[in-house]
Image: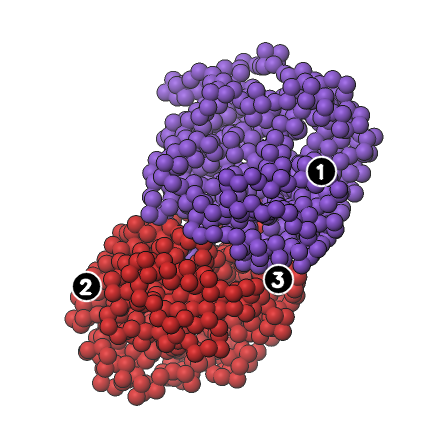
Chain colours: A purple, B red
């Protein structure tokens, strides 16, 4: 296997150290402009790091001849598999101190390859880190231990085919290593779509979405990838097999639900039958501004408790609205979107806007199909959304410390939770850096009984201390979430960064069951060590 | 604790041997009329069995003094806890050969009582059978083993309180032993409803619904009780605890999903925070007849793949339609219902009827609110639905053998599956009895990718051989489901009757994990032995 600098499905080169495509990273001038927004950042950006400057150690193991064709020890490839794409990962790369670089990277071509690699690793004390698009922002794809002889990164992206399509039943059998655009391209000729569009869409895989219970396109009802799973094929060190392809079942606890969210600690998801959507033909969207954030929350709750089921229902607080260019007067902005493959959605949008106005919202222009010029606030938000992770890297190069974290809580806890994050995490950032922090919030998914707030914290760091500062801020964030009984993650995953919060949240009967399952399925404890369970 | 002949929440007496209320059982004349429908049944009904005629053995154990106030050895109570309410249970009672009668019945008042009872049972080799409303139709609440010193039926119905209501967040903390009407009565003053209406609604509990992943009110989207769970409190022999109350989470595998469907084999669900609905103010329903069943299937698939989300979408084949009085000309009948707490649903009904007509359906009258006289086919079906289990008992008293079983499969498998059940199960029933069987089918829940067919098989038995005949028919049914990769149960549960099919269906990695979880949570193997795992 040779190094593959270009990203699967494209001819563009992926950044080994930062978000997305190398050619989409902000240039020095844009970095400087970003830095100017945060008082106390560097005068000029940190240079883009080069693998050649890293001391990449020689691998501690060699693969057996029968598996050698699947495995590479190329330093460039290994460096690109050392970490995910959290701020913590980016700043470590920028500072020339990445996490443990894996000894080997394997790219299996089928489930048998995965099984053979696990067999070999289990027999040789080699830790195996399942790796999809590598976009983890929670330390989910790196090795932080010291009890294994070597580390193998198991890159699944060679398994990227849609193997079978059931058009009448709107479902497809898809290999787990398919990146978002790669699988959508194969579904498009059939008029179908998985319609799972996380912010990482271009740089994350089906298997990664499944293993982390990713949040997707729909803001309401079916918010997570979980709901679109018909069956999973899982390879574990102890056994392999697929659940039956079923629209629903009540036969015992759901087998799939144990592996959804297992983050590579129980097994490797190699393929899945997924439920698909017809491509929507009817769309309508609009934005609503609110002078008062509590009124905006009440409006969103009313929409979430209606049966209108918007596909998009994203509430930006005044800071988010300002950064996204969606409002400049301190207003909060609610972005609403409806869509359907079968009929017009204008009535649903109208009803949702009525609910918003009942709670003090001021409505803007409606956009009723995809070709019409979009409501400017909706359009501004969309562009900003996709650009955000790149801007974060630009800020990192200016010595800023940036954390984004998300959670979910019941409505009764939401106002106090958001207030506490703003004040307590803001105070922790100030204490850690001496600089005032920007703390903004948006709701990304909403439910009849609660909502999922997403927070962004940005503050000027102290050169060289960024990781420690980030860890301090993260600890404060985890404390606030725990104190308000808000989940440690709604859709990013637990990884290694959220373990302390996860351990406190997980009920004891499930902890015992999960540990027992780990012992049974991964007796040599080689799978993604440190994730979910020690 | 004394015997309580009256049913919780009412002054009516529950039948110890048959479905529902004793005073609602068909009288001898009605039984005879039912028997006349099936050639070969008895000339007069079997007598209603009396506990006094059973040889109820003395209990093999006594409870410790500290728990004695929770426990009874009353023969009447014990006999009523010996089995569920499957045909197999009813005929055994009618023939005076009920299953193993538990030594004791306990009615805990809180989670601590449950924990204390499990501790005592674990230390004394006593099997514990969690028992809600006792309406299991799959052998889920009886003891069939011989490796325990004694058997304790753990009747949860004293824990029937709604403990807390969050009106703004539309959710409530409810004890697991609350029967359907008992919990709805406590929610009604708040304008809220759980809106979970299985056929067993009056005679089953929240805990039973959760432990069996029951199918509920909604025919589409949120079909199972699972989707309405905010958090569970579980007591196991090894540990107890509650998951956090969250609208959604991506923190590891869902802890609740391991206990949903665990059928009392991993722990006892003592309470749950449940998501509620506002009571619907807008309703509309209609029926559609189809001369051709395949066209009806296509119509239902079109509705399921739209985003119309009917609350009811029940397709009766010609046999079901005839029995329910919904059609008399060999047509299949689709019963469609829409409802909303927030706005009119007429447009959605109209769109669904358009789809049905596109596939050859003939539409009847529309019913647009609850006070209007209902469409006669809809109304006939509703009355028949609630009466069905009583009629089954009437048929049993006439010596008929009746099985009802349900499944789910993807659309590509549905036509052949239904055909195979009609022919192969019909042939098995004929072979076992020498009499022609009636086999009818309805779809109870539908999905974009498949549907849940529900079958009823009725045939005249041979006096005294009914259990063997039923077992033969059941084996044939299980074989057909397995051959078509249709789930062994969509919402009834696995229990003991579906174990062979379940074991074949369950993927091996999950089987290993489940066995490991059982060992960890129930080390003395006292919880519902024989269910899910040996």
Disc 2 is placed on an element classified as helix
Spatial CA distance of label 3 from label 2 is 50 Å
* Badge 3 and badge 2 in a common chain: yes
The 10 Å Cα crowd at callout 1, few under 14, some 14 to 19, many 20 or more, is some
Tell me, for residue B170, which label it has, or none.
3
Q: Who's the residue at 60% across and 75% down the image?
A: B69
Q: Nearer the viewer, residue A7 or B180?
A: A7
Quarter that holds the N terminus of chain B: bottom right
The quarter holding residue B467 reads: bottom left
Spatial CA distance of label 3 from label 1 is 33 Å
* Badge 1 and badge 2 in a common chain: no
Q: Who's the residue at 53% across and 16% down the image?
A: A76
Tell me, for residue B427, which label it has, or none.
2
Disc 1 is placed on an element classified as helix
The 10 Å Cα crowd at callout 2, few under 14, some 14 to 19, many 20 or more, is some
- The label nearer to you, 3 versus 2, is 3
Spatial CA distance of label 1 from label 2 is 71 Å
Q: Mark 1–mark 2 contact, CB under 8 Å? A: no
Q: Nearer the viewer, residue A471 or A62?
A: A471
């Amino acid at each position: 296997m040779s190094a593959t600098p270009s990203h699967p499905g494209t001819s563009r080169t992926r950044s080994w150290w930062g978000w997305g495509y190398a050619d989409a990273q902000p240039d020095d001038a844009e970095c400087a402009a970003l830095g100017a927004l945060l008082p106390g950042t560097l005068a000029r950006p940190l240079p883009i790091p080069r693998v050649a400057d890293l001391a990449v150690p020689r691998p501690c193991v060699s693969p057996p001849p029968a598996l050698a064709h699947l495995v590479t020890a190329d330093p460039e490839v290994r460096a690109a598999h050392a970490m995910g794409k959290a701020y913590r990962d980016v700043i470590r790369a920028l500072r020339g101190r990445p996490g443990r670089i894996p000894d080997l990277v394997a790219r299996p071509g089928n489930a048998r390859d995965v099984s053979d690699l696990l067999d070999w690793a289990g027999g040789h004390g080699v830790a195996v880190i399942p790796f999809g698009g590598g976009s983890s922002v929670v330390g989910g794809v790196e090795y932080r231990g010291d009890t294994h002889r070597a580390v193998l990164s198991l890159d699944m992206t060679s398994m990227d085919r849609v193997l079978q399509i059931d058009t009448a039943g709107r479902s497809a059998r898809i290999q787990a290593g398919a990146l978002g655009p790669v699988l959508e391209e194969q579904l498009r000729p059939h008029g179908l779509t998985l319609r799972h569009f996380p912010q990482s869409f271009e740089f994350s895989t089906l298997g990664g979405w499944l293993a982390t219970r990713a949040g997707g396109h729909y803001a309401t009802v079916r918010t997570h990838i979980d709901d679109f799973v018909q069956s999973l094929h899982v390879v574990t060190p102890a056994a392999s097999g697929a659940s039956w392809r079923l629209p629903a079942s009540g036969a015992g606890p759901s087998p799939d639900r144990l592996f959804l969210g297992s983050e590579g600690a129980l097994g490797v998801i190699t393929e899945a039958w997924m439920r698909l959507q017809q491509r929507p033909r009817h769309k309508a969207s609009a934005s609503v501004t609110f002078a008062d954030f509590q009124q905006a929350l009440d409006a969103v709750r009313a929409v979430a408790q209606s049966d209108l089921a918007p596909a998009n229902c994203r509430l930006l607080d005044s800071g988010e609205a300002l950064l996204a260019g969606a409002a400049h007067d301190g207003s909060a902005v609610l972005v609403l979107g409806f869509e359907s493959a079968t009929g017009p959605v204008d009535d649903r949008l109208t009803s949702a806007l009525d609910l918003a106005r009942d709670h003090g919202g001021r409505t803007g222009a409606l956009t009723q199909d995809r070709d019409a010029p979009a409501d400017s606030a909706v359009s501004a938000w969309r562009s900003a959304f996709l650009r955000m992770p790149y801007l974060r890297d630009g800020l990192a190069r200016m010595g800023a410390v940036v954390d984004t974290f998300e959670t979910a809580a019941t409505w009764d806890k939401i106002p106090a939770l958001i207030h506490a994050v703003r004040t307590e995490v803001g105070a922790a950032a100030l204490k850690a850096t001496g600089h005032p922090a920007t703390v903004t919030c948006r709701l990304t998914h909403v439910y009849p009984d609660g909502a999922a707030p997403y927070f962004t914290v940005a503050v000027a760091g102290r050169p060289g201390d960024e990781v420690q500062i980030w860890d301090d801020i993260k600890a404060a964030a985890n404390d606030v979430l725990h104190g308000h009984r808000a989940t440690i993650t709604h859709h990013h995953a637990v990884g290694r960064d959220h373990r302390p919060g996860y351990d406190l949240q997980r009920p004891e009967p499930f902890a015992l069951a999960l540990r027992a399952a780990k012992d049974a399925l991964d007796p040599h404890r080689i799978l993604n060590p440190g994730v979910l369970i020690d």
